[in-house]
Amino acid sequence: MTMTRGNLFILSAPSGAGKSSLIKALLDKQANIKVSVSHTTRSPRPGENNGEHYHFVSVDEFKALIDKGDFFEWAQVFENYYGTSKQAIEDQLNKGIDVFLDIDWQGARQVRALMPEVKTVFILPPSQSELEQRLNNRGQDSQEVIAARMAEAKSESSHYDEFDYVIVNDNFDTALCELEHIVVAARLQTKAQQARHKALIADLLAD
Ligand code: GDP
Ligand code: ADP
Ligand code: 5GP
């Protein structure tokens, strides 16, 4: 079997639509997928660990990384900086591992320009009231932060049609199953299968 380069996926959504929960559940079900750990200047939420959920850095440290050219993409979201380092994805893709980016629409635009083969997925919540409910239920952000995120939800959602796939995260298991299908379909693309099953194809086509 020949090694094939991993697929790159982007998951975007308004805050609270379920990106992190869906990615976590997907990683528990499917082998050979990693989520890229972004750098951010926002403060850690209760239960978030440095290096696991994000690399938490100061604004000065973030700017130094921009100047060094370490970021594959970066953007300012909710007054904080967020960015994906080149290192967070290249090593994994080269090892044949699929990589998920949980990034906003501005980052998605940058990645699309750099890697047009990226598969992009937008998650919509089932309603505005359910989105607000989920942000409240998560219980990790202040009322002020939740209000700011709800206010941003509309402009974030308005970019849904720049994405290849749209999933409505109403029933969690249904949404997870739909996301899994996108990953599996990407793995079955002819170019990847050609590399993976080179010997079989040669054998089947031999005289
Ligand atoms: P969440 O929306 O509840 O997941 O809250 P976060 O604070 O984790 O993320 C805030 C926003 O920043 C979301 O829109 C993320 O998609 C976006 N984001 C996180 N990491 C990155 C990154 O590395 N690059 C970019 N461009 N956006 C990011
Ligand atoms: P995001 O990463 O997009 O900000 P999260 O994954 O943190 O969103 O989800 C926000 C909250 O909503 C979490 O408390 C999560 O457990 C909950 N949640 C996610 N998906 C669903 C769903 N389909 N039904 C009910 N609650 C959900
Ligand atoms: P949170 O602060 O709730 O973890 O994330 C807020 C938003 O920032 C989410 O929409 C998330 O997708 C986005 N985000 C997180 N990491 C990155 C990143 O590395 N790049 C970009 N562009 N957006 C990110």
Image: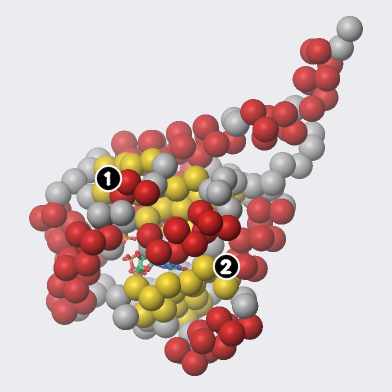
User: Percent from the top left, x then y, of residue 81?
Assistant: 41, 78
User: Is residue 62 depicted above or below 10 in this figure?
Assistant: below
Front residue (pair 119, 99) = 119
User: Percent from the top left, x then y, of residue 92?
Assistant: 66, 57
Type of the residue with mark 1: Asn
Q: What residue is disc 1 on?
A: 169
Is 174 displayed left or right of 202 in the figure?
left
Is 94 displayed left or right of 199 in the figure?
left
User: Percent from the top left, x then y, of residue 195?
Assistant: 75, 33
Q: Secondary structure at mark 2?
A: strand
Type of the residue with mark 2: Phe
Q: What residue is disc 2 on?
A: 72
Q: How is the image coloured?
A: secondary structure
Q: Secondary structure at mark 1?
A: loop
| CB of mark 1 near ligand 2 (< 8 Å) | yes
Whether residue 33 is visible here, answered yes or no, is no
